[in-house]
Amino acid sequence: MSRHSGWARVFGWGVLPGWATLEVMGREAGEVSELPITVVRVHHERYVVSTLVDDAAWVDDVRAAGGQAVLHHGRRQAVELVEVAAAERTAVLRALLATAHGGLPHLDVDPLAPEAALSTAASTVTMFKVATADERATA
C-alpha cells in the first residue's frame, strides 16, 4: 500500500517543468512513499536535491533502496539515484536556486553568490544524479 500526498500527485502530472513525484520504498514500513520534488537539469543531466536537511527520511529511504526509485512526471520512469559528492554539487545548486520559485530561504544563499558561498551551501545538502536503465547500460 502506498502513502499518497496531494502535492505528490499534482507534481507527478507533469504540468510544470521540473515538478515530479519521487516514489521510493520506505525502509521502515516497507511501503512505497511518494513525495513531490523538483528535478533540476544541468548540462542535460537530471538531479534531485534534499535542501532541508541531510537526514530527511526520503534520503535515507533512497540510500536503503540502493538508489532504486521511480520518477513520475507525466509518465513513470524507473531510475537509479546516484549520490553526488559535495565537491560536485555547486553547479546544480546554482541551477536550483535560479529556478526555485520563492527561493530557498532556509539555505540563505543567493543564486548569484560567489562560488565559495555556493560551495559552502552545497556541502549542507544531499543531491542525487538521476540515471535511467539506458544511461547505466552505457556508462
Image: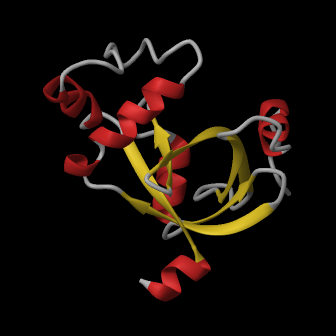
Quarter of the image holding residue 118? top left
- Does 24 sit above or below residue 120? below
Q: Considering only vertical position in the picture, is 139 above or below 88?
A: below
Q: Position of residue 4 (x, y in %)?
A: 83, 42
Seen at 38% across and 58% down, the residue is: 83
Q: Is 127 situated left or right of 120 in this image? A: right
Residue 54 shows in this picture: no
Residue 128 visible somewhere in the drawing: yes
Q: Is residue 105 above or below residue 121?
A: above
Who is closer to the viewer here, 31 or 20?
20
Q: Position of residue 33 (x, y in %)?
A: 71, 50
Q: How many marks?
A: 0
Q: Residue furthest bottom?
A: 137
Residue visible at 73% across and 57% down in the picture: 32
Does residue 85 sit above or below 13 in this rendering?
below
Q: Quadrant of residue 114?
A: top left
Residue 84's x, y, as percent? 33, 55
